[in-house]
Amino acid sequence: MSIVVFDPDRVDDVDWQDRMRHPMAEDPSNGMWLSDTEPSAIDAYQLRQQRLAKVRAWLTASDYGGVILFDPYNQRYATGTRNMFGYFLRNSTRYIFIPAEGPITLFDYPQSYHVSTALETIDEARPSKLVWSSVSGKDESTAAPFAREIADLMRKQSPGNKKVGMDRSTHLQALALEAEGLEVRDIQGEILAVRAVKTPQEVKCLQVSMAGAEAAVSAVRDAIKPGISENELFAVMYGEVIRQGGEFIETRLLTSGQRTNPWFNEASGRKLRPGELVALDTDTIGCYGYYSDFSRTFRCGPGRPTDYQKMLYRMSYDQVQHNIDLIKPGMEFREIADKAWKIPDRFVDQRYTSVMHGVGMHGETPFIAHAMDFETYGREGHLVPGMVVSVESYIGEKGGREGVKLEEEVLVTETGGALISRFPFEDDLLGNP
């Protein structure tokens, strides 16, 4: 019996079209199929096609012959495919080549091609040249075969165009591509700009995702009691996110009592005591891969909130509402920063880092900094209908016992802002009767 050894440099050794297509791919009734990662109430085919069309329009306008996407978020945006998402967030070994025109080629983890080839956005699947290269210490030896294969695709599908974009990789791959005569550009910022304005189908996905995240926060609110730990509450939230069809939570921002000040502590084994505040930020990659980002602060009973707690909460609430009212199409980022709610001096040191930031498949463009931080973190631009932003607030003074975190997610419309997050605020903390 002879043993056939596959040569990764000879892609003709495998009939990719026949062997790597998913068995369901040829059934027209499965045109919207992707397990539970696509919503039945949303036209998933249109969702994918509109996003891909935006990517290709940008490639053509910017004179790119093609783009290589390593970032799983960009891959999902452009093609609707996902595979072992968390694994590929830290392993840049799954990549997709998208030419300005012509077939799209996926380079995937061995034997997992069927996960993605059911979709019309993937024309061909091949084994990744980079899989296991880092853990095997073979990054240098795999860079050249990777680059030769990409250069061959560029010559065939974008003849005469040597400009190729990459969103994430090591310098070894970029150098190898340049050795093949290609002009490599870092396009992470450019593709985030493409993604900034959402299609109507994306807005529906964000709304469905938010409903799942709100259910998770409601479960946390119901579970708050003396003696329960922050970790237990976080487990309640995470479990409900998964049960609602969400995917994972990017941070562990759920804290209580003195751990709410300053912000950005993460959930711990600390147990709640009566009368303490409990603050959280969802930061959830929710249903269908879309981000849900809002924050709430609660109080552990029994009893009533203190005047200090109500003061913190009211300030945070006022900051969010004031800044939501600034949202209008055409509003310049710098103008928003200048007109944002004025933070009292005693709370400035521990301010949240942004007035508002973009939301899509994760925290995205734009990032609108406070006026005092604009030269450091800010950028010029203006709001456009279809953008989605989260409006942030943290109020807690340096050395204070507690702090309040509130945040709302808002769609920029033709006339102003429309709330996507609808979770109610706490009447007792607002001082309402």
Image (cartoon, rainbow, N blue to C red):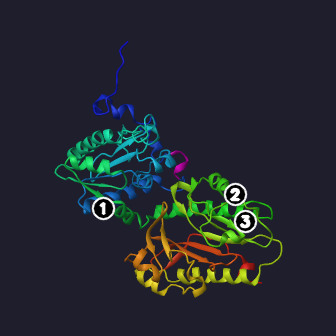
**Crowding at mark 3 (Cα within 10 Å: few <14, some 14-19, many 20+):** some
Q: Quadrant of residue 13?
A: top left
Which numbered marker is on residue 221? 3
Q: Quadrant of residue 428?
A: bottom right
Hey, which residue is sitting farthest front in the picture? 399
What is the magenta range? 34-38
- Mark 2 belongs to which amino acid? Asn
Whichever of callouts 2 and 1 sits on the residue coming sooner in the sequence is 1
Marks 3 and 1 sit apart, C-alpha to C-alpha, by: 44 Å
Q: Does the magenta segment cover residue 35?
A: yes
**On the rendered structure, is 405 left or right of 359?**
right
Hey, which residue is sitting farthest left in the picture? 160
Residue 146 percent coordinates (x, y): 30, 42
Q: Which residue is mark 2?
A: 231
Marks 2 and 3 sit apart, C-alpha to C-alpha, by: 14 Å
> SS of the residue at dot 3?
helix
Which residue is more in the foreground, 313 or 227? 227
Q: Which residue is mark 1?
A: 58
Which numbered marker is on residue 170? none
Marks 2 and 1 sit apart, C-alpha to C-alpha, by: 44 Å
Residue 107 percent coordinates (x, y): 37, 42
Q: Quadrant of residue 286?
A: bottom right
Against 285, residue 151 (above or below) is above
Residue drawn 16% across and 51% down? 160
Which residue is more in the foreground, 412 or 265? 265
Q: Main secondary structure of the magenta part?
A: helix
Residue drawn 50% across and 48% down? 85
Whichever of callouts 2 and 3 sits on the residue coming sooner in the sequence is 3
- Name the image quarter holding the N terminus: top left
